[in-house]
Amino acid sequence: DIPTFTLNTGHKMPSVGMGCWLGPGGGGDVVEEMCKTALKLGYRHIDTAYGYFNEEKVGKAIRESGVPRSEIFLTTKLPNHHHDYVAESLEESLEKLGVDYVDLYLMHWPQAYSRTDNKPIPYGQSPTFLETWKDMEKLLETGKVRAIGVSNFSVKLLELLLKEASVVPATNQVEVHPCLPSFELKQYCEDKGIVLTAYSPLGRPKEYDGKPVFLTDDDVVRIAKAHDATPGQVALSWGVQRGTVVIPKSENPERIKQNITLIKLSDEDMTALNVIHRKPGMHRSLLRYHSNSQDGTVFGWTYEQMG
Ligand code: A2P
């Protein structure tokens, strides 16, 4: 069985979930197939978003899987251009998913975009992420979300949020993997009772420079061999063993299965994996690599703002 983490709401969240980002096209029928396979192989946690353009397919897979809705931990996310449209956006997501509630509803990014012209709204202008969070807090009373959380928040932004929030986010979902272990953010979240969810826990090997990074690292390969496991399983087991939820994406049944089959790493293994990012050229962020827009921003936020 996949271990679970207990959220600050008391709800249990399976430590491995199926990540459903398949690019701007949404993935079409592949997403449906992938989610059905995952549910058949024992996954009970699916992570999607309004902005993944595949909530209908995810919902269809859940309905047709035969797995009761109540056994599945389902996450979706509020898109940037709906920060002043929170209750309505949730309704749209529930409608597309064909469900009455989601287990977790996340603010996808701290950055709001205008609903009319889809341009980033400058920091400090309404809707600020604090205003959006206040609207998300109200959703808890409707029973349509079991828990609320954030995504892509740095320590700095969480500090600002917690100063004003009535509800502490249940989770913060960020890019985390052996090349970007984010120890400080992880410790901060732990101290505040926020579960850290690692997206791109495999470093999205096909897209990143077009070649794998840590999956071919000598230490990762050595540890994998010693456990008769794959480098992917090593990276995901490291993630769960250090206390983070991991949401790897795979459309391949063999790898879907691998990714929920965790191994028990030794203290020495963990120590070796914790320092991989210190090797030359290994401390890297996929997000930053991809967001090489001319002005050096990610959805209008500078890296400094994001922390
Ligand atoms: P595929 O869908 O063909 O399995 P991330 O979740 O970090 O974004 O990574 C997703 C990418 O990693 C996908 O390209 C996926 O390809 C690949 N992948 C998924 N599971 C594994 C694994 N166990 N080992 C290596 N690559 C994997």
Image (cartoon, rainbow, N blue to C red):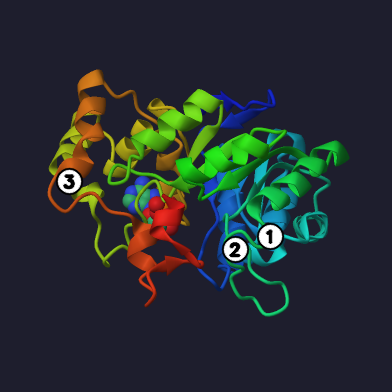
Using the image, determine if residue 282 lies above or below residue 145: below
Q: Farthest residue in the bottom direction?
A: 117
Q: Tag count in the figure?
A: 3
Asked if marks 1 and 2 touch (Cβ < 8 Å), the reply is: yes
Q: Amino acid at mark 3?
A: Asp
- Please state if 299 lies on the left or on the right of 145 as rendered: left
Determine whether 130 is above or below 67 in the image.
below
Q: Residue furthest right?
A: 142
Assign a secondary structure to mark 3. Answer: loop
Question: Mark 2 belongs to which amino acid?
Answer: Tyr
Left or right, 184 with respect to 199, comes to: left
Q: Is mark 1 within 8 Å of ligand 1?
A: no
What number is the disc on residue 217?
Answer: 3
Image quarter for ligand 1:
bottom left
Residue at x-position 37% and y-position 34%: 184
The reply to whether residue 150 is in sight is yes
Q: Whole-Å distance between the Cαs marked 2 and 3?
A: 30 Å
Amino acid at circle 1 = Glu
Q: Is residue 236 above or below residue 130?
A: above
Name the residue carrying label 1: 55
Disc on the earlier residue, 3 or 1 = 1
- Give the spatial CA distance, label 3 vs label 1: 35 Å
**Foreground pick, 148 / 83:** 83
* Dot 2 crowding, Cα within 10 Å, few <14, some 14–19, many 20+: some
Res. 52 mark: 2
Determine which quarter of the picture holds residue 183: top left
Q: Residue 303 at x, y = what percent?
A: 39, 58
Asked which secondary structure carries label 1, the reply is helix
